[in-house]
Image: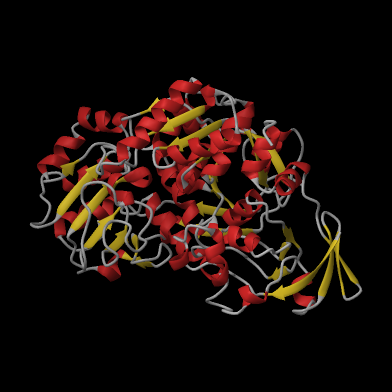
Amino acid sequence: MFTAKIWKLGDDIDTDIILPTEYLAFETVQEMKPYAFSPLRPDLASKIQPGDMIVAGNNFGCGSSREQAPEVVKALGVSCIVAKSYARIFFRNAINNGLLLIEQPDLFDEVNEGDIAEVTPGKEIKVNGKSYDIASLPQNLTDILDAGGLVKAMRKRNGLD
Amino acid sequence: MGHTLIEKIIGKKVGHDVKPGDIVTVPVDWCMVDDIMVPFAVQKFEEMGFQKVYDPNKVVLIYDHFLPATQTDDSRHFRVGDEFADKYGIKNVHRTDGICHQLMTEAGYVKPGDIAFGTDSHTVTYGCVGAFSTGIGYTEMAGILGTGELWIKVPETIKIEIDGTVPGNVTSKDIILRIIGDLTASGATYKSLEFTGSTVEAMSVASRMTMSNMSVEAGAKCGLFAPDDKTCDYCKIPYDDEMRELHGDDDANYSQILRYRAEDFVPVCACPSLVDNIKPVSELKGTKVNQVFLGSCTNGRLEDLRTAATILKGKHVAPYVKLIVTPASRKVYRAALADGTLEILSDAGAIITTPGCGLCCGRGGGILSDDEVVVATNNRNFLGRMGTSKVKIYLASPATAAATAIAGEITEA
């Protein structure tokens, strides 16, 4: 279980919003960090603290397949994203980059930015005294997340790290 | 409660019933790595520390995007692929045989009910034979190469029922373009499309392939057709009880059902620069074109070339219009050569190229420049796809493409 402060975004947060094309060519994800979410909320990246969480509506991560999008969110220290739904390539890229994604249909409509959530992965999220059920991820996905991404998970699987 | 086709395919592979939203790990029957992604997949595979490929016979390397090479760095991709194949005993390497999505069923790999992943978004094409196939990133491909499995989320299904007989100048390309226009470019995100109805049953496998191929342009994870006797004939397998079971049940849970009357379809184009910007060809009449492209994994098959040849026979492309014809594979090329199709196209003034992805991905001969207009039978009209960002790309059927080449302006067949 961990507690996290909520930053709230809307529906259809596309990968161009998460990280605009002009910053994709930076050599390191550290250089990209200040520009995360900049088309929508230019000050958000500087406000997000390690451990905070993002709550959003439908179709989070739609658009291009750029793996820099989940990478930069992870680099900001975001503990998890809770959305109504995700675009399929973003979902996969996020898990493979070690970023926890949770699907929850009701939370978005009932919480406010700045609320504090208690997250128990695979079980529930508690906010303002109310509990929201969340589905559990299968062990293999949890393994990828715990390892810090797919390359690391595979290295661990192969007895290298 | 019955099951949709995708639920049946996945359920059978994992050995238990599945429902939309379930996350399951599936065994992978086929991995396809194309020449663009080979070096990246190999690098990740080595970083992951694998000592062997899970099953070399299930891995297929296909060189198509860079063939023949047009830039000096391209051949490095072939070299890395060849070295990887030699090191790990991969025998299924197609170095000059055609486009990956054509070859994966044509060369006998993917069969109905199989699960296949590829490093290209148009991997969805194999849904034409009732297989679950979709595109993934190269990091995930590296993982599959080592483990032989991948986690997937079972998608919801949109059922698309089409009944009746289409007008003579309408092809399956016009049908899928109209459907994408109706769904929008994101309307099927994360979902499986399941095509059914008497119109679909009457289609050739090649025509179905065009529709599966473009299902990703509506965001779909896959675009499936239930296998029938034609499918099994194409795949050279018996049409048995196992095959007959591979269809969506009447009482399955569909998230949405779209119904069309085939007689209502008209020839259409996807206009610049969105795949869901669909307009009837009749409304575009008079639009001058500089080039016409007939080819790609969407519409580069024998029936596509024959359709064009029927229209072009005894005629000639308009002055100043370049008609570029690219068969989807060597097999298609040779068949079109043998039956006289290529001769008709050549007599009409077509430039016939080697099989490959070439012009469709903006790599091959026929790149266009600012303010030029191309009518093309491929699948994407994104900005800059076939040249500069000011090229205007209209996606159309082979019939519309041929009629347009003769007239020099967008024309209904």
Number of numbered discs? 0
Answer yes or no: is residue B131 visible: no
Query: Residue B203: x percent and y percent?
Result: 43, 42
Q: Can you tell which quarter of the image residue B406 is in?
A: bottom left
Answer yes or no: is residue B364 visible: yes
Q: Residue furthest left?
A: B319
Query: Residue B290: x percent and y percent?
Result: 17, 60
**Residue name at image x 51 percent, y 56 percent:** A65
Residue A20 sits above or below residue B190 on the image: below
> B93 left or right of B365?
right
A116 or B242, which is in the foreground?
A116
Q: How is the image coloured?
A: secondary structure
> A158 left or right of B332?
right
Residue A71 sits above or below residue B65 on the image: below
**Residue name at image x 10 percent, y 41 percent:** B347
A95 or B95, which is in the foreground?
A95
Query: Residue B33: x percent and y percent?
Result: 46, 36
> A107 left or right of B47?
right
Q: Can you tell which quarter of the image residue B385 is in?
A: bottom left
Query: Residue B269: x percent and y percent?
Result: 34, 62
> B81 left or right of B286?
right
Q: Quadrant of the N terminus of chain A?
A: bottom right
B215 or B265, which is in the foreground?
B215
Residue A142 sits above or below residue A131 on the image: above
Q: Quadrant of the C terminus of chain A?
A: top right
